[in-house]
């Protein structure tokens, strides 16, 4: 596993994402439950409401583990609590959209890890 973000914290991810059954689609940031929890909840495009209600379908993982599955998630790491995002795959490519407004999050707003920042 590549560590993109040092001390990124843990997040909750559905097993569909971790097992490769579904692609990352929905990302919601909640208030952290404990200091190591960064608040991110990551769901796949095939997760249903019933699936999400079953706690056994969720797993706690290091945020970097999910970034290894979908590197575009690196860019959302420092977005505020309350962020409600979706990863859209279409003819325009991969984009992160703000779910409530439908607006695209510009890439220049993405988090860049310290080791990748231009001097």
Image (spheres, helix red, strand yellow):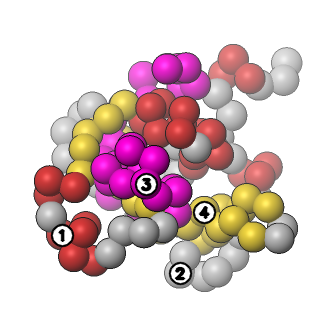
Q: Residue at x 27, y 77 (%)?
A: 49
Q: Image point 32% across, 75% down: which residue?
A: 48
Label 1, label 4: how many angstroms apart (C-alpha)?
Answer: 21 Å
Q: Nearer the viewer, residue 113 or 69?
A: 69
Q: Quadrant of residue 50?
A: bottom left
71 vs 32, left or right, is right
Q: Secondary structure beneath disc 1?
A: helix
Query: At x 79% / y 49%, what residue is drawn?
Result: 108
**What residue did someone put label 3 on?**
21
Kindly identify which residue carries mark 2: 100
Residue situated in front as seen by the camera: 107 or 91:
91
Mark 1 and mark 2: Cα distance apart in space: 21 Å
Is there CB contact under 8 Å for labels 1 and 3?
Answer: no
Q: Which residues are magenta?
A: 1-30
Task: Locate residue 6, reporting x and y percent.
Answer: 49, 20
**Residue 86 horizontal/vertical position (percent):** 56, 66
Q: Are marks 3 and 4 in contact (CB under 8 Å)?
A: no
Q: Quadrant of residue 34?
A: top left
The residue located at (53%, 51%) in the rendering is 79
Spatial CA span between label 2 and label 4: 13 Å
The mark closer to the camera, 3 or 2, is: 3
Which is more N-terminal, label 2 or label 1? 1
Q: Nearer the viewer, mark 3 or mark 4?
A: 3
Going by the picture, which residue comes out furthest to the left? 55
Cα distance in 3D space between marks 1 and 3? 18 Å
Mark 3 vs 4, N-terminal side: 3
> What is the CA distance from the residue labelled 3 to the residue labelled 2?
26 Å
Q: Pointer 4: residues within 10 angstroms few (<14), some, or many (20+)?
A: many
The answer, for residue 46, to whether it is visible in the render is yes
Query: Is 52 or 112 nearer to us in this picture?
Result: 52
Q: Which residue is mark 1?
A: 53
* Residue indicated by mark 4: 87
């Amino acid at each position: 596993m590549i560590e993109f973000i040092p001390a990124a914290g843990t997040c909750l991810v559905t097993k569909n994402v971790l097992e490769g059954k579904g692609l990352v689609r929905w990302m919601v940031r909640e208030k952290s439950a404990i200091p190591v929890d960064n608040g991110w909840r990551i769901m796949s495009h095939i997760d249903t409401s019933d699936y999400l209600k079953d706690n056994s379908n969720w797993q706690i993982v290091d945020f970097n583990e999910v970034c290894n599955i979908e590197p575009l998630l690196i860019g959302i790491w420092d977005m505020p609590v309350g962020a409600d995002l979706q990863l859209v795959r279409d003819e325009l490519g991969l984009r992160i959209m703000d779910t409530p407004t439908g607006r695209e999050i510009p890439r220049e707003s993405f988090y860049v890890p310290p080791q990748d920042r231009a001097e």
